[in-house]
Image: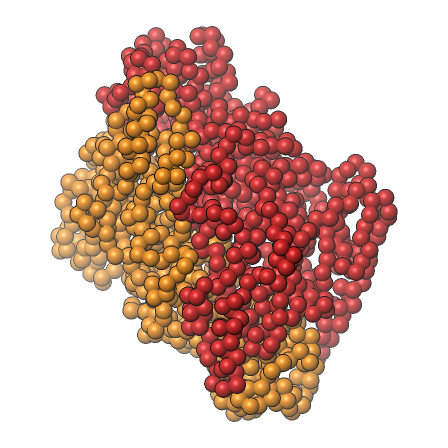
Chain colours: A red, B orange
Amino acid sequence: MIIKTEFTDGHGKGEVADHHDIEPQFPGLIKSGSFMLRRPSLSSDQPINNLVTPLLTDMYQVTMAYAYYMTGRHEEHAVFDLFFRRNPFGGEFTVFCGLDQVLRHATNFRFSESDVGYLRTLLKPPNDKEKLARHESFFEDYIKNLDCSGVRILSVAEGTVVFPKEPLLRVEGPLGVCQLLETTFLTLVNYPSLVATNAARHVLAAGPGINGKKPQLLEFGLRRAQGPDGGYSASKYCLIGGFHATSNCMAGKLLGVPVRGTHAHSFVQTFTSLDDVRNCTLDGVNLVEKTLNYRKMLGGIYASTNDGELAAFISYASSFPDSFLCLIDTYETLQSGVRNFVMVSLVLSDLGYTPAGVRLDSGDLAYLSLECDIVFKEIAARFDLPFFRNLGIVASNDINEEVLHALSKQPHALTSFGIGTNLVTCQAQPALGCVYKLVEINGKPRIKLSQDIIKVTIPGKKNIYRLYGAKNEPILDLLVGDKDEIPVAGKKILCRHPFISQKRALVLPSKVESLLNVVFDREKGLVVKEATIDEARVRVSSQMKSMRTDILRHLHPSPYKVSVTDGLFKYLHSLWLEESPIMELS
Amino acid sequence: MIIKTEFTDGHGKGEVADHHDIEPQFPGLIKSGSFMLRRPSLSSDQPINNLVTPLLTDMYQVTMAYAYYMTGRHEEHAVFDLFFRRNPFGGEFTVFCGLDQVLRHATNFRFSESDVGYLRTLLKPPNDKEKLARHESFFEDYIKNLDCSGVRILSVAEGTVVFPKEPLLRVEGPLGVCQLLETTFLTLVNYPSLVATNAARHVLAAGPGINGKKPQLLEFGLRRAQGPDGGYSASKYCLIGGFHATSNCMAGKLLGVPVRGTHAHSFVQTFTSLDDVRNCTLDGVNLVEKTLNYRKMLGGIYASTNDGELAAFISYASSFPDSFLCLIDTYETLQSGVRNFVMVSLVLSDLGYTPAGVRLDSGDLAYLSLECDIVFKEIAARFDLPFFRNLGIVASNDINEEVLHALSKQPHALTSFGIGTNLVTCQAQPALGCVYKLVEINGKPRIKLSQDIIKVTIPGKKNIYRLYGAKNEPILDLLVGDKDEIPVAGKKILCRHPFISQKRALVLPSKVESLLNVVFDREKGLVVKEATIDEARVRVSSQMKSMRTDILRHLHPSPYKVSVTDGLFKYLHSLWLEESPIMELS
């Protein structure tokens, strides 16, 4: 089912898919690539952001690559896993995103001449004459020619619902270059996954909506994001997480997604009286005159509304008669704003236009929306205008997941939510904490130990299989070492908790899905086509739908099981014992 | 005084100024511009980030500009203030940053052909034939040719300590273009100011350091920022806020600031035994052999350290003998890591090199640092090597302002702090909440009312004057309307709380400083040269030093007064009464 969002907040074309639908699309929208962009470049496979180059990395990656080169280890075959240890926001699920930019970075990975020149200033030439030649060669032979041709990347698909300890990316290849990719990959995955998860949580929190109409979620966060790219990424990944539109025009252009926006308080403030209304005829009709007729007819509270605000609404109506949506709290929502909206809407209706609704940006949103709804119903009855019963009421003041949950437990008449700060800053937890850990070197699995068990890594190359039960619902995800038997549908398999030996289950899967697949392998000429926003959005939506609701719920959600095979369990624990020094206490 | 930071964390050249010094610089560093960059472009005055174009704005700015144009109001003279309402992090001060990118955006403000094409898809042509011509003209005459030639911007200087309600930017010019600048300016100021403030707070929290050595603060947040630009901005503005170096190589290159980094756990993990050591002679000496001699000599706990870790340290030493700094918690900090560091350091010392120190990334940082310090002192005594008493001990695990305060109240031996997630995400408050409000239109001051007093704006054009007392300490900031008398040194002036009439003070300033100055005026050919990192950093440092400590303190800080002149007070309140509708209750 495709939901039209045009009624909620006037402008911007297009339609947008409902979160819980399986095949949403943005039909009829401008697809990215259909415009020639001067800056930023969308051309081919370049990263959207010009800051994404191999130099966008931590210095210690460079020093490590240097040390590997100096000691001749840079070409050794390494395997790194990118994963996180805890789901964000106190929840039990995470939406994976960012693969598209990871692929672009890997494809374009190449130090420029000037990057090499800069790196030279950071790494002091050795005194040792033998080493000096090697030092020169590091820059001239190695760094200058380095690319990702030897690198293979496996990844879960954009928009997949994932869980702690699962490798979201598995990066295989020469030690030096794989090391240099770490920080950039983390940067490109961490925030997109975090904000997409936050968006998906907001969609859940917004619930099924009122009167059978799904709530519309609008991302309004550009101004509160970490700079231009934070804003762009927020727009993109919130749409993937299930939002319906963004206020960010740049995101609209680059991604071909719906943009929304009407007017701000400042628009209203620029008008001080009805004298400020200019050129406000519409289809040959003088809007001021007509509006004042309604004011006289309605009388009472309608006679003493703020004239500047009324002037603003009339001017806005003359420019946007098709999508008339007003911010009504500049002076006084119920005494002035909603009344002025009603008067101008009656005029538009006489001219054959259907107004879109109102926006509330302060005060008690539930109460004010109900009061507006009462006013609208009165007008609908008095003038026999049914559209007044179907106006959008958009809320946009400090909304977050908690507010949405609270609203769902009380009467209100809100149909859309514009969410900015809390959504894009991920206030409840502003970082996901993905890490990138070595799991194998030269074919030998490696483990990272820690006094903190959650920080112990699962060694070796492994894939993730999602095992489904009889109801076609995921039962658990199984990490399977590359020498382990692959689980198959209809065959029982022992699944173990990675750290607690007593926790085991025999699972008979009705279906088995491999989550980690090769997405980049230059040697084989393979770079998987990046997912469109639509494809990723559909994946999020369908996966959320398939998950047990106790995993998704807001309060005390159940953890989803991420298990290991019996073989992997045994290997992990033998390696752990082997690497742990025996403490000596005295 | 210039503090060398090279001892703390090996690599990256340069020196860095101490927070509390008045004239810090980054001498000898590569200045931005000295490299020709392919991408991102540093050329001339372009925004660093290619996403910064006029389209990086909220849709409602476009719809408002359209409505202004359609009703012929787009050229009316408007004045907007950009300000915030509350200091972040429960504090009572904020560091203003972001002006440099604001100026670049204003200078380059111009919609591309393709932007115009995109905007056409968002704004539906009117049915009304009269309006259709105007609609066409909006794109072809107006948007296509729009730039900031009519715009004048006043601003406080980059790095100024500022307070709520003060206009940080005052944007004057034609209503349409000033409106279109809103979101982008907010995006370019909000995060830089927030993160610079956070950095300055961390510098305060780190305190004076131990044994007379100032603590070194290193920004390690790239991977946890909101994408590439969030990371770059964090690096830049944390340096301005008083940090000493960053791990972000891209920031190092573009800004010419010190970068730091040594190695990660993964480096250690790639070594499983001493057989993995290759090419590890240094100045003709076999490092493994020498190290094993020390192991034999020291015996005991030194004999049973992790061999893979020892191999890693030897390999690292052979590449970085001048700046040997090891991460020592991969296996066991006290049983293995610190011992392996000691053995390799003794070898380096024999060869004439001075090791730099160790990094702790887990566990009880205070305790572990003290234990390491004991080990180092024992070795210093036993081998008569004084440098062992001066090694750096860097901490880098989940450090934030609270942790720094806690550490300052207990014994520890930490000399540097690498801070990532909490610093760049501004976990304690991830958004500053700057707003951009209309304060004047066509010479008429405007007010924005709200049931919430904190949201009421101060109308009209105004400047900020900082009034200093006898001790040359700022007493308060005074907002002065453009028709008010300007405060002068040696002359008493009545300063009033903007909202509470009883709160008044007569101030006799010893010095008066105008904070808001013209930085951009195309008509006069004026674009102020952007501050260098050094200049901004010096400003933060000197202003922090001049502020009363009760304003800067961590717990229950005193609010700094932002007052208005008597004239502005009276004007504000008369306008407020005029615009407020009288409620009718029944």
Nearer to the camera, B323 or B558? B323
Asked where in the image residue A569 lies, by quadrant, the reply is bottom right
Q: Is residue A447 above or below residue B381?
A: above
Q: Residue at x 51, y 18 (%)?
A: A390
Tell me the quadrant of the picture where the C terminus of chain B can be found. Answer: top left
Which residue lies at the image location 61% right of the left edge and 68% below the top edge?
A175
Give percent across and percent down for residue A232.
Answer: 47, 44
Q: Residue furthest right?
A: A491
Residue sitting at 28 percent across and 32 percent down?
Answer: B141
Q: Quadrant of the N terminus of chain B?
A: bottom left
Q: Decide which of A517, A336 is in the foreground and name it.
A: A517
Q: Is residue B388 above or below residue A246?
A: below
Coordinates of residue B278 in the picture (x, y in percent): 63, 81
Task: From the top left corner, tell me how far across and down residue B383 is, in percent.
Answer: 55, 91
Does residue B449 appear anywhere in the picture? Answer: no
In-image side of A414 versus B293 (left or right):
left
Q: Quadrant of residue A547?
A: top right
Above or below: residue B158 compared with residue A125: above
